[in-house]
């Protein structure tokens, strides 16, 4: 049985932007004195860093016969065949081909994705769309668990 785990971490450039937000907040507080400037800088970096860390903490796992994607847990028996999406198809499935009822774990900084049909007739969700850096590996793990 093949297992799979991936964390959809934010790119390094987002962390640089978080640091720059702290610097900007420090400059905004500069007219009030050096201590407010330092407080603004530390507070800005902390808040922006917490936001980037939170957004980049989503995980995808194949565990104990289930696909766990962020807060969704779907038994593998309720899933159809996985479809690996290259960058172009991934853009299409998150824009004009998208179904508003679908469950999306979307990260715009990850170009590739995996789309899996939901076959459970009681579930109104037609498919789950997962941004992933290794769609082939995730598809192989789902196929191995189902077999």
Image (cartoon, helix red, strand yellow):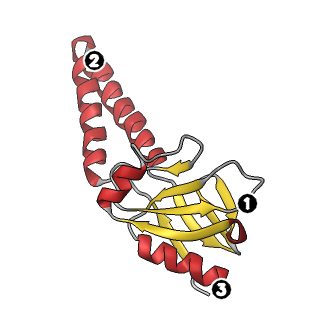
Mark 1 or mark 3, earlier in chain:
1
Residue behind mark 3: 147
Where does the image place residue 14, in percent across and percent down from the top left? Answer: 30, 45
Give the numbered dot on residue 135: none
Quadrant that contains the C terminus? bottom right
Secondary structure at badge 1 equals loop
Q: Is residue 3 visible to us here? A: no
Where does the image place residue 95, in percent across and percent down from the top left? Answer: 39, 43
Q: CA distance from mark 1 to mark 3?
A: 18 Å
Q: Residues within 10 Å of mark 3 (few under 14, many from 20)?
A: few
View extreme (right): residue = 122
Where does the image place residue 96, in percent across and percent down from the top left? Answer: 39, 43
Q: CA distance from mark 1 to mark 2?
A: 55 Å
Residue behind mark 2: 29
Give the mark toward the camera: 1 or 3. 1
Residue behind mark 1: 120
Q: CA distance from mark 2 to mark 3?
A: 60 Å
Give the mark toward the camera: 2 or 3. 3
- Residue 69 higher or lower than 106, as above or below: below
Mark 1 or mark 2, earlier in chain:
2
State if disc 2 and disc 1 touch (CB < 8 Å): no
Q: Is 30 situated left or right of 102 in this image?
A: left
Quadrant that contains the N terminus? bottom right
């Amino acid at each position: 049985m093949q297992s799979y785990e991936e964390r959809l971490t934010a790119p390094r450039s987002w962390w640089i932007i978080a640091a720059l937000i702290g610097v900007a907040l420090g400059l905004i507080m500069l007219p009030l004195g050096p201590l407010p400037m330092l407080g603004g800088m530390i507070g800005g970096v902390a808040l922006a860093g917490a936001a980037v860390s939170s957004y980049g903490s989503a995980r995808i796992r194949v565990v104990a016969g289930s696909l766990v994607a962020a807060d969704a847990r779907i038994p593998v028996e309720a899933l159809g065949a996985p479809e690996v999406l290259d960058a172009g198809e991934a853009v299409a499935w998150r824009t004009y081909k998208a179904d508003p009822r679908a469950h999306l774990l979307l990260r715009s900084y990850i170009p590739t994705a995996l789309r899996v049909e939901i076959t459970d007739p009681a579930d109104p969700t037609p498919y789950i769309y997962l941004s992933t850096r290794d769609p082939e590996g995730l598809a192989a793990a789902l196929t191995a668990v189902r077999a």
